[in-house]
Each structure stands twice: as C-alpha cells, then as structure tokens.
C-alpha cells in the first residue's frame, strides 16, 4: 500500500506543468509574467481578483511578436485558452493603471502542455492491471481535490476581504453615530438650560 501511494505521488508530481500564484498589484501599476513555449502547445490562464476596489483588473496576453491574443478590461475573473502558433516567449500582463488609490490582490493560474498518460501502456489497447487502475483513479481524485481546494481558498479569501471591509465601514458608522448622539445631547442640554436662564431673567425683571 505504501509502495502504491509512493508511485501515484511520483506520477502525479511529474505530469503537472504550470504556475499558480497570488500577488499584490499596486495602484497605477502593471505586472507582467513571461513563459517560453514551443509551437503547438496549449496553455490555459485563470485569474481572479481577491480584494481591492471593485475587484476588477485589466488583463492581456501577447505572443512573441506582440500580437494581442487576449485583452479584457475591468474583469473580476476570467479564463482563457490558446494553442501557440509559434515558438517564443508569451507574455501575460495585469494592469491596475485605471485605479488611483486602491491596490489589488490577484490570483493567477497558468498551465501549459497536454497532460501525458500516467503510464506508457495507457495509450495501448491492452487492459490496465489493478495497480495501474488504482493509480489512475487516485490521480483523478487528487486533481478534483486540488481544484476544489483552490476554489475554496479563493472563495474564503474573497469573502474574508468583504467581511473585513464591511466591518470597517460598520465601525466607522457606529463611531460617527456615537459622536453625533453626544453632540445632539449636549446641544439639547445647552438649549434647555438657555430656556431656564431666559425665564429666570424675565421673572427677576418683573419683580
């Protein structure tokens, strides 16, 4: 059983090609990432703005000749797939230049290449052994688990940021209401005191 788990771990580790990261994008700034790819390679790009402003960002992808393959503005999240037509360095850029004072936290997942068969004989017509079938099943389950964990992490980070922002607004509103109540209460006391002072002065004048 230990040997089976170790084999499946190695198979799962060496067939995944890509970059997954979360980075901070300051206001009035742009960040680009570069990847050298061969011709005929398929790549996939997924991104999502976790926090900051209206949770939007500009994104564009260019090929080695600076031809624009993908260009979207003020997107909260999106996905893009493309098969390269030439060998060279491909560029993925995220821009927050339209924002003047809010920075963004952006999640990006860049994958390239076709997933190779876990085992050499999977591409043949022969049936898989019980060990090979177990490895394939574990691999598929691990992929689903990894995707689910990524989705839940993004959802938790996004909801946490919204909750913290809401808490900050509620706190400021509560402090403002408290100060306003004190000001109104103090004003009412002064106003009532002035009424009694005027009445006392008029009584003294009549006597």
Image: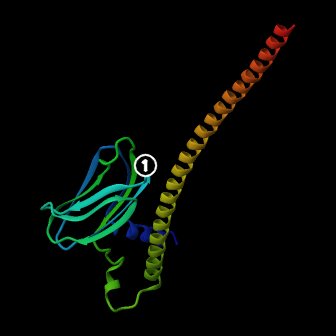
Q: On the picture, is 27 further left or further right than 7?
A: left
Inspect this view and state whether residue 14 appears.
no
Question: Which residue is found at the position 35% from the left and 54% from the top?
Answer: 57
Query: Residue beneath label 1, please?
Result: 53
Q: Secondary structure at mark 1?
A: loop
Image quadrant occupied by the C terminus: top right
Q: Nearer the viewer, residue 42 or 136?
A: 42
The outermost residue toward the left is: 65
The outermost residue toward the right is: 207
Q: Nearer the viewer, residue 66 or 127?
A: 66
Question: Which residue is found at the position 25% from the left and 71% from the top?
Answer: 82
Counting from the top left corner in percent of width and height, residue 62 is at 20, 61
Counting from the top left corner in percent of width and height, residue 134 is at 48, 79
Question: Which residue is found at the position 53% from the left and 51% from the top?
Answer: 162
Q: Nearer the viewer, residue 190 or 11?
A: 190
Counting from the top left corner in percent of width and height, residue 53 is at 43, 49
């Amino acid at each position: 059983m230990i040997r089976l788990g170790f084999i499946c771990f190695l198979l799962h580790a060496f067939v995944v090609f890509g970059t997954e990261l979360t980075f901070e994008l300051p206001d009035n700034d742009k960040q680009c990432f570069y990847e050298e790819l061969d011709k005929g390679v398929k790549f996939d790009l997924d991104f999502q703005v976790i926090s900051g402003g209206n949770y939007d960002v500009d994104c564009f992808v260019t090929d080695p000749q600076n031809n624009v393959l993908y260009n979207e503005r003020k997107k909260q999240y999106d996905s893009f797939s493309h098969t390269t037509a030439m060998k060279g360095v491909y560029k993925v850029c995220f821009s927050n230049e339209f924002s003047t004072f809010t920075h963004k936290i952006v999640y990006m997942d860049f994958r390239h290449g076709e997933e190779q068969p876990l085992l050499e004989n999977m591409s043949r017509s022969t049936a898989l052994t019980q060990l090979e079938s177990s490895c394939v099943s574990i691999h598929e389950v691990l992929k689903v688990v990894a995707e689910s964990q990524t989705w839940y992490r993004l959802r938790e980070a996004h909801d946490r940021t919204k909750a913290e922002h809401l808490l900050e607004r509620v706190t400021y509103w509560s402090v403002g209401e408290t100060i306003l109540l004190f000001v109104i209460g103090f004003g009412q006391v002064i106003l009532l005191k002035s009424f009694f002072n005027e009445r006392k002065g008029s009584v003294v004048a009549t006597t």
